[in-house]
Image (tube, coloured by chain):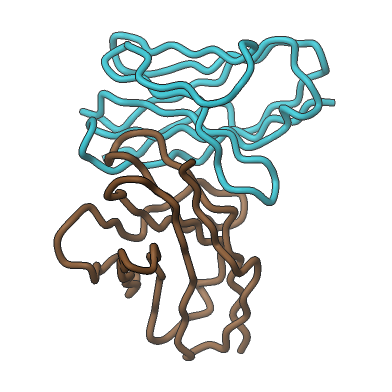
Chain colours: A brown, B cyan
Amino acid sequence: AQSVTQPDIHITVSEGASLELRCNYSYGATPYLFWYVQSPGQGLQLLLKYFSGDTLVQGIKGFEAEFKRSQSSFNLRKPSVHWSDAAEYFCAVGAQAGTALIFGKGTTLSVSS
Amino acid sequence: DAGVTQSPTHLIKTRGQHVTLRCSPISGHKSVSWYQQVLGQGPQFIFQYYEKEERGRGNFPDRFSARQFPNYSSELNVNALLLGDSALYLCASSSGTGHEQYFGPGTRLTVT
């Protein structure tokens, strides 16, 4: 069965420090992978996507993610976190872009000053 | 350009009642998907429509139904509401298979 695991429920990072959010997926074929961010009471904003090609993808707001097929992972990274990055982050997988997405349970990011 | 819009923003219903949620996709997008997000969880897929045809259905009871109109807007209907239906209902649009989904702000449904 297809699934997405985000092992970290809650992470606290100091402002200016680097960030890595983990995502592992279980999928039979080549997956389409996404990271979304959700601020309290808001909808989901697409940060970045991986369809094919270069395994290191760049997104908005200075985020990047690396697809590692051998580890079934798609971890999200940012070199320097800003207080405005505090939010809920969701990793998602789909059979194709534009089809039903399977989401992880999310990781809550807190940023300390 | 306007993003995905959803109405209403908030809704309070009583158990056993019926509710209709509405979604307008981004202009030019022909596919609409619905997701349910229970507090503290990731969104769960309910339905997908493309060009007015149902393309996918998640593991939800028959109390949940949806449709897409000729202008590509969509409605999600839930009958015989249960307390467990309380959630944020998200609508997402895309231009079709091969393209990413963009989400609306959601409708917060509370069932009392």
Mark count: 0
Snapshot quadrant of residue A78: bottom left
Quadrant in which the N terminus of chain B appears? top left
Q: Nearer the viewer, residue B1 or A76?
A: A76
Q: Determine the residue positioned at 32% across, 72% down.
A: A64
Q: Determine the residue positioned at 41% across, 52% down.
A: A45
Q: Determine the residue positioned at 62% across, 80% down.
A: A12
Residue B48 drawn at (x, y percent): 40, 24
Residue A91 drawn at (x, y percent): 46, 56
Q: Which of A54 and A27 is in front in this view?
A: A27
Q: Determine the residue positioned at 66% across, 32% down.
A: B10
For residue B34, above or below residue B37: above
For residue A28, above or below residue B19: below
Relative to A37, B44 lies left or right: right
Quadrant in which the C terminus of chain B appears? top right
Snapshot quadrant of residue B53: top left
For residue B35, above or below residue B69: below
Residue A61 drawn at (x, y percent): 34, 70
For residue A8, above or below residue B29: below
